[in-house]
Structure formats: structure tokens, C-alpha cells
Amino acid sequence: MSNSRRLFLKGACVAAVGASGFTLVRAKEAGKNTSKPVYKYALVHDETKCIGCDACSIACREVNQVPEGVSRLEIKREGPFGEYPNQYFRFTRHSCQQCESTPCVDVCPTGAAYKDPDTGIVSVDEWKCVGCQYCIAACPYQIRFINPITKAADKCDFCKDTRLKEGKKPACVSACPTKALTFGDITDPDSQIVKVLKSAPSYRSKLDLGTRPKVFRIASQGGEVKL
């Protein structure tokens, strides 16, 4: 996006907020979000299978052309725990939680942050984004960032405009060598993701906030990597 276009949009945004148009935009977007999506895509990260190899984050960067210095997906490492030789690490996924109740969308003054009514995927339209960083401040998971190339807010969107558009699974899912990631429609009782969720207890991050995230985790029991 050219600097002149971005400056124009920023000026228009400020004017809209000053004229109370912000409230009207939010009401319009809220109305869109009430429609029931055709699919409800979600992801399961099985921490008992994750080995912290970073194949998922590398694939994400390559497929979605994420520049160096920022990341849509990271694997956080904790440990080692225990005593030698029975030591182990814990690996957790740090990415957009694809909330059903979306504080990032609620605060966006231009409609750049939105939830796709057909898939339930929370996305960003970089052409509408003015870089105000309201969504970054509103995200309780602290995963959004400003893309240094596009100057727009960015984050994981399940490869909506790349892999999913081609009828494929997200890059991270396909790249995982241990099959620790499962992706699919949680409204389909016969889907693999539903079967995985029924097979083992899972948890989600910060449920007390009421965001209803769609990234599920099967908790590590220890011993993913022995030293």
C-alpha cells in the first residue's frame, strides 16, 4: 500500500471516529458476526506429540511470506524438567486463538479485522488496516503484530488465502512430522478433529475471558524429549 493511500485512510479513520462513525461501523460488523458460519474451523495441538522441531513455524513463514523479525506462529519451550536422565521439555503453540468472541474485531475502526462468516476464521484485510494497533492492544493472547512490509496488522489465519484456498490443510499441519496438529470443522461430528477431541482431555487458553478460542490443546504429560 502506498504511503499516500495509507495517510489518506488514517485521516479518514480519525475523522470517522471524531464524527461518531466508529460506533456505526462496530454495530454493522457486530451484525455480520451474528450469522452462523457454514464451517467452524478449529485446530488441536497435541503437546504429547510435539517435539519442538519448528517445522510448523518454518512452513508458516514460507507459505505466507512472513518477513523475518515477526512470526505468525511460535513454539514456546519450557524446561528441562526433572532430573537426569529422566528430563523432558514442554512445548506449547503461540499463535492466534481464532476466538469466537473477538475483541480484536470489536475495536477495529475500519473493518480490517473481521470474522469470515463462511469459515469462522478471524482475519485481517491489509488494505483496510491503517496501523492504529487497536487490535494488538485488545488481543488478550498478545499474538498480533504489525507486518514490516505491509505496515498492516498480521497474524495466523489458518492459511485462509494460501493453503485453504487451494483445498489443502494449513501449512503447519501438513509440515508436522509427528502429526501433533489436527485441523478441521468442529461442527462435523465425523471429522478427524472431533474424533481427536473426543479421544483425550483438552484445554484452551484463558477461557475465563469469554473469548471462546478455537485452538485446543492436549496437555503434555511430560517426556516429549528425553535428554
Image (spheres, rainbow, N blue to C red):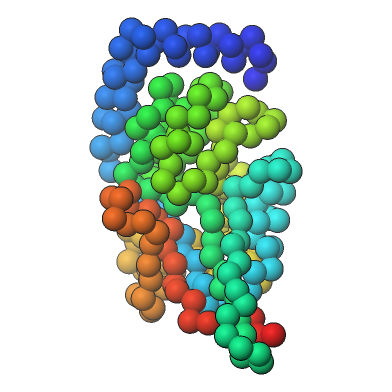
Q: Is residue 19 toward the left or the right of residue 65 in the image?
A: left
Across and down, in percent, residue 158 comes to: 53, 50
Seen from the viewer's position, the closer of residues 132 and 149 is 132
Q: How many marks?
A: 0
Q: Residue furthest bottom?
A: 85
Seen from the viewer's position, the closer of residues 94 and 55 is 94
Across and down, in percent, residue 218 comes to: 44, 72
Look at the image and tell me whether residue 142 can be seen. yes
Residue found at x 36% / y 76%: 201
Give the quarter of the figure containing the N terminus: top right
Across and down, in percent, residue 193 comes to: 42, 67
Give the quarter of the figure containing the C terminus: bottom right
**203, above or below 169, in the image:** below
Residue found at x 38% / y 79%: 199
Residue found at x 36% / y 56%: 206
- Quarter holding residue 103: top left
Across and down, in percent, residue 109 comes to: 40, 22
**226, above or below 158, in the image:** below
Q: Is residue 187 toward the left or the right of residue 78 in the image?
A: left
Residue found at x 48% / y 36%: 136
**55, above or below 144, in the image:** below
**4, above or below 62, in the image:** above
Look at the image and tell me whether residue 119 can be seen. no
Seen from the viewer's position, the closer of residues 178 and 118 is 178
Q: Residue furthest front?
A: 83
Q: Is residue 85 toward the left or the right of residue 40 in the image?
A: right
